Structures are given as C-alpha cells and as structure tokens.
Amino acid sequence: MHEFAFIFAGFSVGLVVGLTGVGGGSLMTPLLIFVFGIKPHLAIGTDLLFAAFTKMGGTVSLARARIVDWRIVGQMAAGSIPASLLTLYVLQRLGPANPATQALMTTTLGLALLLTACATLYKALRGKAAPAHISTESLQQATRARHWALPLLFGAVIGSLVTLTSVGAGAIGVIVLMLLYPALPLPRIVAADIAHAVPLTLVAGLGHASIGSVDWPLLLKLLAGSLPGIWLGSQLMRKTPERVIRSLLSLLLAYAGAKLISL
C-alpha cells in the first residue's frame, strides 16, 4: 500500500512542478518528513536525486528551444558545485544521522521554505513574463552580471543551501538570477535556473548517496509517479490561472517552513 502512496506523492509533486515551475524540493522534502515520517537526512538526500532526474528532461527540451544561457549556468555552477562539495564534507564529518545535524537540517530547511514561499509569491504577483527571444546584442548585454564575482558568491550560497536542505535551486534561484541579470527575459532566467539545478542536485545527491543518505527504492517509486505528473502538469499549465496556484502554494510552503522551524 505504501508503494502506491509514494508513487502518488511523486505524481502530485510532479503535477505541481509542471503547473507552476516551483522546484520539487520545496514540496517533496516536507511531504516525506511530515506525511511519511522519513528521517530528514534521508528525505533530503533522496529528494536531491529526485530533482536531478526530473529536471534533466526539462533541461533537454529548453536546450532544444535554445533559451538556455550556458554562460550564466557555468558562472553559477562555478560557485555552487565547490560549495556543495564543501558542505558534503562538513556533513560527512558531523554525521548526517547525528541529532544535532538533523536539527540543523530541519531548521535550515524551514528557513529555506519560508524564503521559497516569499519568492513564489513575488513571482506570482510580478505578472506575465516577457518574451524569451531578444536581439543578439541585447542578449549579450543582458547576460553580463553587475560584477563578475556576484554569480560565484550567490552560486556558493545556493550550493550550500541546496546540499543542506534540497531547497533553493528553484524559486530562490530564479529570484537571485532576476537580481543579477535584471535585463534578461524571465523565460531565459527560468531556463538557466533549471539547467543549473541539474549538475548541482546531481553532485549533491550523489554526495549524499556516498554517506548513506539516499533511499534508492523510495527514489524509484517517486520517479515512477513524478515523470507522468510533470508531463500532465505542463499540458494543463496553459489552462490554469498561474497566479492563483502560486499564491496558494506560497501559503502552503510558508506553513511547512514555520512547522519545521518549530520542531
């Protein structure tokens, strides 16, 4: 019976991700902890690989549409991947199942969810996105950060946050990219964010696997549900009022974040 529950959970999260573009980590990790009673370190490690595999398909389709700015992805990854590896080293030294480490992970996860809730609400209220295609000259200008060090710095913060909590590569990443590249159209920002999340969550997820923080059978059940869920969500996206869904989602994330902080 539990197997179907996990597949249904994967489908539900995939559906919401397809509908809203909000990262699966902000939904799946609290769901695994609160509903299924999975230990935080296992929920986070499993969800990281869940995110990596689910976002791979999205990255391929976005790359085919030629709206992924690989220069931005590279700049962010140059900060996030080393920070992720450093965070994994610290987690290994502390012991992921250590009660103090678990407390740190749940509190940080709660704060990350509150940040994601704010970011999701901001995106909902911001209005419709600009077109993805702009002139080559304008695009070259738009893909230059205000300072070369800023993508590395923000990438490092996101890398640590994602490795510690599995949250941050989605809505928080989009807000960071909006601040760093204000002239870049929103579809290109979202595309860069999704493409950057794949290597980051893969490195972080495999790192968690190496310290025993991934439940492989659970991962397969979640993926069995999420892949059709994402497909259906992306089909329904055009017929659903995105602003309403994102606003409701931000309230749900805020509730989950507050509950984790109070644990």
Image (spheres, grey):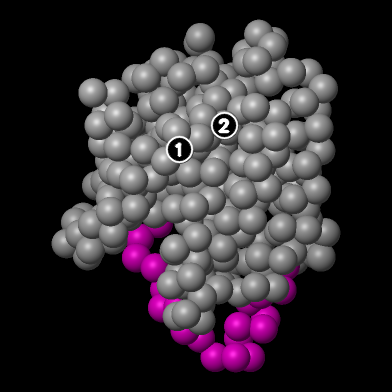
Q: Residue at the location (74% across, 50% down)?
A: 81
Q: At label 2, which amino acid type do we have?
A: Val
Relative to 61, say whether 228 is above or below.
above
Asked where in the image residue 68 lies, by quadrant, the reply is bottom right
Task: Residue 219: give its label.
Answer: 1
- Viewer-nearest residue: 187 or 99: 99
In terms of depth relative to the viewer, which is nearer, 71 or 214? 214
Could you give the CA–CA distance between mark 2 and mark 1, rounded to whole angstroms?
Answer: 8 Å
Secondary structure beneath disc 2?
Answer: loop
Q: Is residue 231 above or below residue 135?
A: above
What residue sits 81% from the left and 38% below the top?
86
Q: Quadrant of residue 19?
A: bottom left
Residue 184 bears which disc, if any?
none
Q: Quadrant of the N terminus?
A: top left
Which image quadrant is residue 234 in? bottom left
Q: Residue at x 78, y 58 (%)?
A: 78
State yes or no: discs 2 and 1 in contact (Cβ < 8 Å): yes
Question: Would you name the residue on which mark 2 appears?
Answer: 214
Taking the image as shown, residue 93 lies to the left or right of residue 251, namely: right
Q: Where is residue 210 shown, x and y percent of the image?
A: 70, 34
Numbered range of the magenta stretch:
120-145
Relative to the observer, which residue lies in front, 183 or 78? 78
Circle 1 residues within 10 Å: few <14, some 14–19, many ≥20? many
Left or right: 228, with 69 as reference point:
left
